[in-house]
Amino acid sequence: MAERETLIKVSEVNKIFNLGKVIVHALREINLEIFRGEYLSIMGPSGSGKSTLFNMIGALDRPSSGFVEVAGYNLTKLNARQLAHFRGHHIGYVFQSYNLLHAYDAISNVALPLLFGGTNHEDARKRAIEVLEMVGLGHRLTHRPDEMSGGQQQRVAIARALANEPAIILADEPTANLDLQTGEEIIKLMSDLCRQLGVTIVTATHDHKMLATSDRILWIKDGAIDRLQERKDLKINTGVVR
């Protein structure tokens, strides 16, 4: 088997929040490698540190100690401007609540990060249409979010995340606001994109349906890694995961 290329490396990461008289150890000595082109799901109960780790990987927060390296960049050494540039060019984000601009149609929502990155209007529009067609929304290009279903809005959000051709897609509870069938469709879409485009997908989720499409599953408990499992090693029986 060919050796897998490490795209994301988390080394000895701790995160401490000082809340007055209360000290919260959100992450404790996290060590993790995530490979290029893999689909990793981070799972754990609320308050486990799952979202904090997710934010570290996405350059949305800094560790109290340790470092996070993504695509060869040590994120702890970048200033705020450099981090913003890094996020805009290397990472695409998909959120639970879609985070679309309701006054804009699908094309404009997807084109926005391209325009912010300096792409001219014509090329940004062309790329937006391309990725919207990729996610199955070629018939909804000029519809605004309030004219779309939740699943369609999430597809727009996925298209927006793909617009800048990022190496990594970070998806935060991407199926939480969707019904069962629509959630399964979104999971399949993300899995297909991972395989077809070679993009690395990291998702923070409570949705056990995500397990079937993940390459590996990272379980977080009390701010530490509880276990890291390959999909083939999981036993899933009527909703029970072991």
Image (spheres, rainbow, N blue to C red):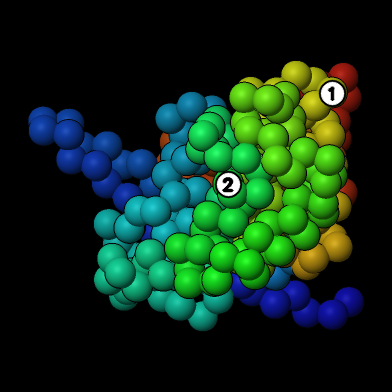
Along the line of sight, the residue nearer the viewer: 4 or 188: 188
Q: Residue at x 77, y 59 (%)?
A: 130
Q: Residue at x 54, y 71 (%)?
A: 119
Q: Residue at x 66, y 43 (%)?
A: 106
- Position of the C terminus, as image quadrant, is top right
Q: Residue at x 63, y 67 (%)?
A: 122
Q: Quadrant of residue 97?
A: top right
Total number of numbered discs in the rendering: 2
The amino acid pointed to by label 2 is Asn
Specify the label residue 109 is tagged with. Answer: 2
Specify the label residue 156 is tagged with. Answer: none
Q: Position of residue 213 (x, y in %)?
A: 82, 45
Q: Position of residue 29 (x, y in %)?
A: 41, 56
Along the line of sight, the residue nearer the viewer: 46 or 171: 171
Whether the residues at callouts 1 and 2 have beta carbons within 8 Å, the answer is no
Q: Nearer the viewer, mark 1 or mark 2?
A: 2
177 versus 48 height, above or below: above
Q: Secondary structure at mark 1?
A: helix
Q: CA distance from mark 1 to mark 2?
A: 25 Å
Left of 186 or right of it: where is 205?
A: left
Query: Which residue is under mark 1?
Result: 181
